[in-house]
Every structure is written in structure tokens, then in C-alpha cells.
Image (cartoon, helix red, strand yellow):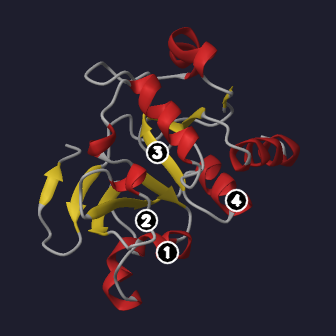
Amino acid sequence: MSAWRLNRYARAAARGAVFAYPTDTIWGFGCHPLIESSVMRILDIKQRAAGKGLILLASRLEYCAAYIDLDTDAMRPIAEPVTRPTTWLVPASSFCPPWLHGEHPTIAIRITDHPLAQALCDRLEAPLVSTSANRSGRANARNALQVRHQFADQLDFIATGFPAGTGRPSEIKSLLTGEITRSSR
């Protein structure tokens, strides 16, 4: 994918665009996490309750630091390499908007090595909202064609040119307790 197109996507996200994109796991919907109206659009598209919370996907842990209420040493496991994509539940900071963590005292964070997500995060110097590209309770879209067929008229763009990762949702694990709340097996 050209640098020009990546820059165009990042500028659109910074202005509030809602988009679909392949991630290190599955196809997802994304937006800038601090633009409440964009997050609400995603929840509306998904027909998802706001109280459930969303995942922040980032290329670097420091992009998520303001959203987390832990010191740097405690956050170290989040940035360590993992054998499969892992989303960590960590205490949300007072800065973390409620439209991200929902009714939970934690925020979900995943550090990604997916080249598209990394490029967008690095251009924004921020994490991205990441939630599966589907309506709540329905199967996830598996490719750009399925996303376009189901959601094209509701999205500002569909980022193509990169494959989705594992094809399975990430494992979700509490950083403080180690409890796994969703397995990716």
C-alpha cells in the first residue's frame, strides 16, 4: 500500500472517519478513540450496547499510556511478544472516556504487529478502536468483499491491501489476575 494512501486513511481517521480494516486477528471496524461521535457510529453499525466496551489496538504501548492506570513496570507484559494475539484488560485511567471502557473499570488493549494497523497508529500517534466487523451476535466479515456487501453505505472507507491475521478473535486476559475471559483456541 502506498504511503500516500496510508496518509489519506490516517488523515480521515483523525477527522472522524469510521472504517473497516484487516487486523492481526480478524476484520474490524475502527476509528480514532477520542472522537465520541465516531465510536457511537461504530456501536450503531454493530447494534452493540455501549456498556460492553471496545478494544484499543496500538502499534506501541506508549500510545495507550494515557488510557491506562498502571505504572510502566506493571504494563510490561502487554508489550512482550506473544504466541497469539492477546488483548489485555487493564485498569482504565480517569482520562479514558466511558465510550471506550463501557461499564467496566478496565480498558482492553492489544499491541499489534499488523502492518496496516501499525502504520495507521504511527501516523496518528494514537491507538485505534478495534471491534469485529459484524452486527452483534452475527458472524464476522472475513474479507473486504463481505464488508463492502454488508456495510459499505455505513463506512467512510474500507482499507484494503493487507490480509487479516489469524482469522480468530484475540485471547482476552486480565493483566492483574491472569484470568482468561476469551480464549482464541
The image quarter containing residue 159 is: top right
Q: Nearer the viewer, residue 24 or 157?
A: 157
Q: What amino acid is at disc 3?
A: Ser
Chain-order first, disc 2 or disc 4 = 2
Mark 2 or 4: the one toward you: 2
Where does the image place residue 153, in percent across and percent down from the top left?
62, 13
**Residue 129 on image: x %, y %:** 50, 48
Viewer-closest of 177 and 68: 68
Disc 4 residue type (three-letter) = Leu
Residue that numbered label 2 is attached to: 96
Front in this rendered view, residue 142 or 176: 176
> Which amino acid type corresponds to the residue marked 1 in the rendered image?
Ala
Looking at the rendered image, the disc whose residue lies closer to the viewer, 3 or 1, is: 1
Q: Nearer the viewer, mark 3 or mark 2?
A: 2
Mark 3, residue position: 130
Residue at image position (59%, 19%) is: 154
Res 83 visible: no
Mark found first going from the N terminus, 3 or 1? 1
Q: Which mark is residue 124?
A: 4
Label 1 crowd (10 A; few <14 / some 14-19 / many >=20): some
Separation of residues labelled 2 and 4 (CA atoms): 17 Å
Rate crowding at label 4 as few (under 14), some (14 to 19) or many (20 or more) other CA atoms within 10 Å. Answer: some
Instruction: Answer with the quarter of the image where residue 174 lies.
Output: bottom left
The answer to whether the residues at label 4 and label 1 have Cβ atoms under 8 Å apart is no
Discs 3, 1 touching: Cβ within 8 Å = no
**Does 34 sit left or right of 5 as displayed?**
left
